[in-house]
Amino acid sequence: MGFFSRKSLKPLRTITRQTGFLWRDIVATSGPRFWQVAVLASVAALVQGGGLLLLHPILQILGLAGSAPPRFPVLGALGQAVGLGGALAFYVALITASGALIYAQTMAALHLVIAYGDTLRNRLYHAIMAVEWDLATNLRPATLAQSLTREVSQCGWAVQQAVQLFATVLQVPVLLAVAMVLSPLFTAIACGLAVLVAVALLPLNRRNYALAARFAGANRALHAEVADELAGLRILKVLRAETVRSAAFFQQVTALRSRQIDQARASGLAGRAQTSLAAAVVAAAVWFGLETLALSLADVLTLVLIFARILMLVQRLQDQGRQIIRVLPIFETIRRQIETYRAATEPEATEAPVFHQEIRLENLGYRYTPTGPWAVRGIDAIIPVGSITAVIGPSGAGKSTLADLLMGLTEAREGRIKIDGVPLTGGTRVAWRRRVAYVPQDPFLFHDSLRANLLLAKPDAREEDLWRALDRAAAGFVRQLPEGLETRMGERGTRLSGGERQRIALARALLQEPDLLVMDEATSALDDDTEQQILHALARARGQVTMLVIAHRSASIALADRQIILTPPEPQSSSAPQDS
């Protein structure tokens, strides 16, 4: 029990484990860059140690060694030969060389840190992009954005502190070796006192870690809250709920600031305690060297300079350690995110099935969790090539779930889908998505040019291909835009009306020349005239592409050759996403 009880050591074990993960990741990711930094730091440490060792004969030349024989005869003889000016010049040369090495090490470390941050961000990004749709639907975009931007940058900064800490650690043994040559007993006593100081600071470091974890969690929650508020701004204004949401927002800000102050207070307290205890150690060591060991003034001055340097390095180590501890919870969160997403990675795409005859649904069923309610079940249907099939049913019947299954976003838990007799499973399912286009009810356009948004579907499309797709989608209004294809779409395409966005989305889908075009309530929010333009465009594409139209409105249903009528298999559970 007491100071080293199991409960008190648990945070220390957590810190040690997470620090181990961070270091292994740095070394594995950085490769030769890390060892380049290590070599430069080692050579710089040796040169700095040599510079301090040279101080002793300089002090002897100045007559501060008393009657004691030279402790380093070779250096003493060299000092006498070149004189005070020569010895000082040689000392300056060593320090200059050390500075050049440290500069080279700093630049190498900077390149290492930048490369590590980019690599970590790429790993997280690719893990998110490759995750199965079942998990992707449960991810919070604001949290992912926070992780990919601010938190990855914080991890990169922590790596910078870790690399600097590594370089600092290499200097301490060199300085201790020089001190041991001068006085082993003095060095041993000073090191023993330093260990006691480190042990005394352990509770403060544990508290610093715990407060850092709370601060990181509060920061992430606030970022997600801000993203939600901005995304739902229109609804908040219509409901006049600004005051209610503002109170909740500022309550989170207050909680965040409270945790920030607690964490800063703990870090500052640890730093001040370390400085005071370190000063006491130096004072005690100097007194002991002069009064008890009867060392010469030259020995004591050299040792004081060495331990002053060690003290500065130890303070730097403590500061760097506290900064790393502050970011460890963030690194651990990102590490676990990558592990979780990689464990749910989609299978590698193989070869897309050839679609010349029909898509067959055989006793198709799906639910979002292995024990949850069925979203769709017992569906048997045939979708002939070139046909237009309407999927109708009440809200919650599973229409959007069926669309996800047909697009290959997720895999049936019961029954199967066949494309010309080929089951839509595994890598075939992922590859099939290359042959599918999708137009949702609220189409998404990136804050880029109209051309760039179209080219997402077919990067190698020619200019005439783009205009042909726009004409097929009844999007001739683009010709009247002052900047034409170079028109910027604005955030989520807000520079265009809803109907214009819908036609651009349809043009992008047709440009892809898909085997299957899925229209998910694509006209439900449009006025009658705009809906008719979209439906006429679809009618002109009849026979050229197989279409699945999810619809409530009669005009869209009338366009279809056949229908799939869905009814809810059982009441929906809150554990499953709501279906249109």
Image (cartoon, rainbow, N blue to C red):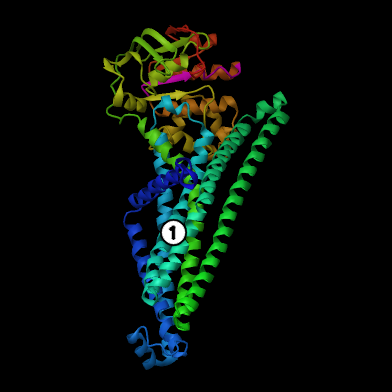
Residue 170 image offset from top left, x and y in percent? 38, 64
Q: Secondary structure at mark 1?
A: helix
Q: Quadrant of residue 410?
A: top left
- What kind of secondary structure does the magenta stretch mostly adopt? loop
Residue 520 image offset from top left, x and y in percent? 48, 19
Q: Let me know if residue 132 is in the magenta part.
A: no
Left or right: residue 140 versus residue 562 is right
Left or right: residue 340 versus residue 297 is left
Residue at 44% in and 15% down: 372
Q: Let me know if residue 524 is in the magenta part.
A: yes
Vertically, is 49 above or below 551?
below
Query: Which residue matches tag 1?
Result: 165
Vertically, is 422 above or below 193?
above
Residue 139 image offset from top left, x and y in percent? 48, 30
Judge by depth and name the residue closer to the eye, 94 or 67: 67
Residue range highlighted in magenta: 514-527
Judge by depth and name the residue closer to the eye, 505 or 23: 23
Judge by depth and name the residue closer to the eye, 354 or 577: 577
Residue 255 image offset from top left, x and y in percent? 64, 39
Q: Is residue 461 among the parts visible in the rendering?
A: no
Which amino acid type corresponds to the residue marked 1 in the rendered image? Leu
Marks counted in the figure total 1
Q: Quadrant of residue 88?
A: bottom left
